[in-house]
Image: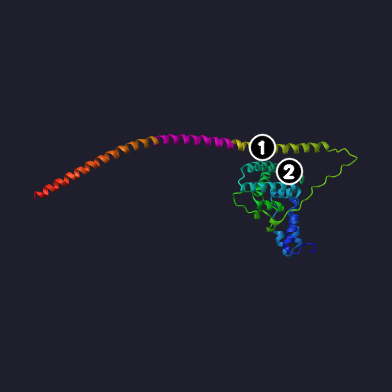
Amino acid sequence: MSDEPDRPEQALLVHAEGLYGLPLGDFTGARDALVREHRGTDLAAGLKALRKPSTAAWVVNLLVRRETEQVEQVLGLGEALRQAQATFSGDALRDLTRQRRQLVAAVTTTARRRAREEGLRVTEAVAVQVESTLTAAMVDAGCADAVRSGLLVAALATTGLDDVDPAAAVALPAALGHRAAPVAPPVPERPVLHVVPDPDADAKARRAAEDALEEAEEALAAVEAEHGRAEEDVARLNARAMELAAQLDEVRRRAAELEAEADEVDADLEEAEDVRDEQAVLLQDATAERDAARAALEKLG
């Protein structure tokens, strides 16, 4: 087509940018329509190979387009964290790590709200994957490039110490050098000057209240789950601490026994060495007497 880039790779990237910015439910239909449109061209196979993103990947892609500045703030903090780790700056690292947790949690909340505006309810499991992807982008530069592309097809996860392949999580290899174009949020409609009473106002208000309650309950459940995990960690570590304390007491008791035994052996060794030295003198004297007696006998013939 005349308005498409000349190279198939560039054209594929342009189409991918459009596809991965669509609502999740529209992706497959739009992709298949493009495949039909370009049937018989080099572009068709590449379009057909574009995978539908997972829900978490789609939410992150949405966030990158709708909240570009906030995402860049996350990635900028990640770069500062990596520099602090490289220079072994302990104080800076602790402060940045605290900021990372707070910022990732805030951005994940924003992502859930943006997804809800698009008609998609983000479950707790999906929210965990979104948070994991943002964290991975902060600790790994390659993951940061994958997130910036807005072409994620799968969530990311890494601690920064393990191997991760960001290319496996994006739609096509060229994505790692691409940055998604920011998209302004929808402009709210101007209010109607002559307000007509809405017969469904009460029902809508109730639904809004129910949605708010559901969101609050989800947030509470997430905090309760984290608290439960923290309680389990405390109980597990307390049990381990008691176990190690008991083992340490046993080691100390055994060390005291061995030290006392070593003192006794040292005393016995000293006494045995004295006896050996005395016997060595007696052995020398006895040997000399025998030699003298043997010589006297040999003289007698």
The amino acid marked with disc number 2 is Thr
Asked which secondary structure carries label 1, the reply is: helix
Q: Which mark is residue 223?
A: 1
From the viewer's perspective, is residue 236 above or below residue 182?
above
Residue 259 left/right relative to 5: left
Q: Which residues are magenta?
A: 232-258
**Element at label 2:** helix
Residues 254 and 89: in front is 89
Q: Is residue 23 above or below residue 109?
A: below
Residue type, numbered disc 1 = Val
Q: Looking at the picture, how far across and down is residue 201, in whole percent?
A: 83, 37
On the image, the x and y values in percent for residue 124 come to 68, 42
Q: Which residue is mark 2?
A: 110
Q: Residue at x 66, y 37 (%)?
A: 223
Residue 75 in magenta stretch: no
Image quarter of residue 274: top left
**Residue 237: in magenta span:** yes
Q: Earlier in the sequence, mark 2 or mark 1?
A: 2
The answer for how far apart the CA atoms under marks 2 and 1 are is 17 Å
Residue at the spot 73% in from the left edge and 63% down from the top edge? 8
99 over 30 or under it: above or below: above
Report if residue 70 is visible in the image: yes
**Looking at this view, is 63 or 34 the one in front?**
63
Counting from the top left corner in percent of width and height, residue 214 is at 72, 38
Q: Nearer the viewer, residue 167 or 211?
A: 167
The main secondary structure of the magenta stretch is helix
The tally of labels here is 2
Quadrant position of the N terminus in the picture: bottom right
Residue contact at pointers 2 and 1, CB within 8 angstroms: no
